[in-house]
Image (spheres, grey):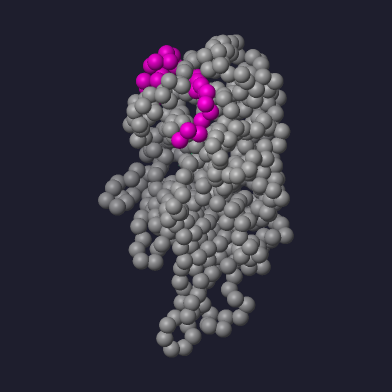
Amino acid sequence: MIGLLSYYISEKPNLGTQSLPRFKGKMMVIPENSSIVIFGASGDLTYRKLIPALYHLYANKQLPENFAILGVSRTEYSDESYRDKLKHSLQEMEKTEPATLDAFIDHLHYQAINTSDTADYNKLTARLDQLADKYQFEQRNTLFYLATPPSLYSVIPASLAAHGLNDEQTGWKRLIVEKPFGYDLASARQLDKDIHEHFQEHQIYRIDHYLGKETVQNLLVFRFSNAMFEPLWNRNFIDYVEITGAEFLGVEERGGYYDGSGAMRDMFQNHLLQVLAMVGMEPPAQINADSIRDEVAKVLQCLKPLEEDDLRNNLVLGQYTASDVRGQHLPGYREEHGVAEDSRTETYVGLKAYINNWRWNGVPFYVRTGKRLPTRVTEVVIHFKNTPHPVFGQDAPENKLIIRIQPDEGIQMSFGLKQPGAGFKAKEVKMNFHYADLLETQMLTAYERLLLDALNGDATLFARSDAVEACWKYVQPILDFKQDPQSLFGYACGTWGPKECDDLLQRDGRAWRFPCKNLTDTDYCEL
Ligand code: BG6
């Protein structure tokens, strides 16, 4: 399988009806020769994420023998000026090796078109023909990456189809669609319908970069490759689950986009619900795209719909306000560039969610995400129930499993041990595993992993239509509720969000874990 563990595998992947990729040497899967067309080629995502990811794949010899990268957008560049621009930005951002960089840059090409004008795509067709000659492609395999504003997500597939660029008779044609996939339930459904008019589901790759993170994938391996945790992974033994996606940064230069989006759409609807699905899903029958995504969709469809009472009592929306943090003055959200002075956009979400199924009935999942919190940390905390009879006293330590997604990736298990000395008092101790301690650390970044998977036709780590719809369906009541004047609380930059979110757990006799940058928080806590 290529979906989950690593690229060092011993057998051919199960790719269903897709053509099988070649294997380089003994283990590594090398994609077939292909063109990679990036729409939005002059945008931030292309510079910051896509080109660096492709460069690394190239430097690690993971790209096809023959490939062309074609940047497409409205801005006029020649191949040379585009190459210069990307070369400089790569040199600024990454450690590059001059010969490798030059060789990589040679694969870059550029075509200006008016992306909103279907007729103008004939320039794209002509350019792809030319590149196919240049690189002597036998098959016209093409990956189209939509790194554009979402307003073009319906337009581009329709225009590609109008020029036959969705036709797989001459080679596969795949479409990667960046988030946000829709703005709400209705628009997500419409977008899905629009794209499906021209591309089939097996051609559509909805990217959620959290699924490309090694440690998010590890949730599955940890759960389903160990006989010792899975028997406890249910309502009989788990008391509650915390999922935290905290960021120290504010909205930076993205105020214009963020103000129309908010934490709910930006982080919760996609990244955090995907993490929740990995924690909550049933074991897949096999490790392949269909089996895994069937289980992801099922668990998301089981989320208990939010009612008026949940919106009022189990949801906390917040917005950061100015404050001095570690000697630095941080402006409030409303003072950020591109943000309306009277904005009511939430930069923080805290929610108590339930999964209505056999495994999880009654177990709360407390989920929170926010900008300008004390530190950047993403983690899942599984709190186990106490022993049935507290023979060592009521204050016996809790059994807790912390699955750290980033940074200081790792796992920490807390349990009770006899406190040395007289009597029988239990004391909490911790066992840690850090990813950094692994010797074979060929860690791909999320974009490297996902680009490679899409080139190899493996959709395991891409969100499927039904799962995306289930997420929107779940959050739609929150999007409606956001309009309510009572719905928003302030919190000072550098704090853990509105105090109302602490109350959410306190009412249940619980408290959030306040995580540090470093996983091991016994001796000191770095923020
Ligand atoms: C993006 C959001 O999808 O994820 C950003 O648009 C957010 O607002 C980012 O900062 C977080 O990603 P990561 O990988 O840094 O946790």
Q: Which residues are magenta?
A: 60-86
**Residue 413 in sight from this viewpoint:** yes
Of the pair 65 and 423, the residue shown nearer to us: 65
Residue 254 among those drawn in magenta:
no
Image label count: 0
Please check the rendered image and state whether residue 67 is part of the magenta-colored stretch, yes or no: yes
The N terminus lies in quadrant: top right
Residue 198 sits above or below residue 375 on the image: above
Compare residues 159 and 343 and report the one nearer the observer. 159
Residue 42 x/y as whole percent:
44, 23
Q: Position of residue 318 (x, y in %)?
A: 48, 49
Closest to the observer, 442 or 250: 442
Give the camera-side residue of 404 and 182. Answer: 404
Residue furthest to the left in view is 327
> Residue at the location (44% across, 81% down)?
419
| Residue 167 place in picture, x, y as percent | 68, 20
Question: Residue at the spot x=40%, y=63% of the render?
Answer: 521
Please say whether residue 289 is visible from this viewpoint.
no
Horizontal placement of 320 versus 172: left or right? left
**Residue found 57% across the figure and 47% down from its top:** 5
- Looking at the image, which residue sits at the far bottom? 422
Residue 237 percent location from the top left of the image: 63, 68
Determine which quarter of the picture holds residue 249: top left
At 51% across and 57% down in the image, what residue appears? 403
Q: Quadrant of the C terminus?
A: bottom left
